[in-house]
Amino acid sequence: MMPILDLPALDATPLTREPYDHMIVPGFIRAESRDAVTRDFPPIRKHGLFPLSVLRYGAAFTDLLGELEGPKFEAIVAAKFGVALAGLPKLFTVRGRCAMKDGKIHTDSLDKVVTLLLYLNSSWEAGGGRLRVLRSATNLSDYAAEIPPVAGTLLLFRRSERSFHGHEPFIGERRAIQMNWMTDAASRDREEARHRFSARIKQFVPFA
């Protein structure tokens, strides 16, 4: 069985240090696997992040998650960022749609060590919704890189007090997997419980 992820492409991509440690890898999902993975993406009708425990998805998406959890991928990421990741708990969440309020500038919480964003839209023509690697907390137009959320594009960054990111407003389908290496299991469990609670509320609130 051919791997879904292009680990050699990740290994060949240099770490960018400015404005903070990050990597962008287009085509990280191999071309021959993209259709199957996007087909098996979980159906999500509300905006926000959803934990895997409340979603249903197909075999190719399951296989993708398995490779993201694998030791080979983790070892490359750890070596690139110079941080020990082995044994750290991982938090998976999935986004299917964006609302107007999404994309505000932030750095991620202190209990996140490295953040992964893997995009899964078949194409992207909109001006909004393109994640920006920002140089400050105040200016969305001052960015070092802009990432369209097209299928297979990977962003990795090490969380820090300078890891500002965000995007211009967009309403509609915007597919992404987010995986975070967390500082400890308690932080992972707390975040997952928060997202599960939010998912339950959205079942009963039409416009949530």
Image (cartoon, helix red, strand yellow):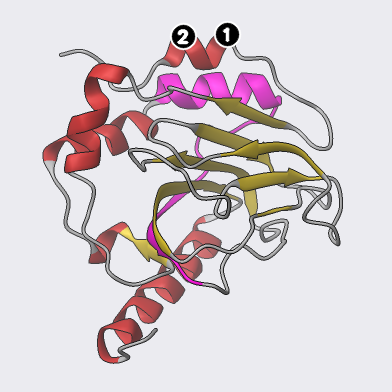
Q: Amino acid at mark 1?
A: Ala
**Residue contact at pointers 2 and 1, CB within 8 angstroms:** yes
Q: Position of residue 9 (x, y in %)?
A: 49, 12
Question: In the image, 16: left or right of 174?
Answer: right
Of residues 144 and 172, the one drawn nearer to the viewer in this rendering: 172
Of residues 184 and 143, the one drawn nearer to the viewer in this rendering: 143
Q: Position of residue 139 (x, y in %)?
A: 84, 57
Q: Amino acid at mark 2?
A: Pro
Instruction: Please identify the quadrant where the N terminus is shown.
Output: top left
User: Residue 8, which numbered label?
Assistant: 2
User: Residue 77, which numbered label?
Assistant: none
Mark 1 = which residue? 12
Q: CA distance from mark 2 to mark 1?
A: 6 Å
Q: Which residues are magenta?
A: 71-99
Label 2 Cα crowd, 10 Å radius (few <14 / some 14-19 / many 20+) = few
Is-magenta flag for residue 93?
yes
Which quadrant of the structure image shows residue 143? top right
The residue shown at (61%, 47%) is 131
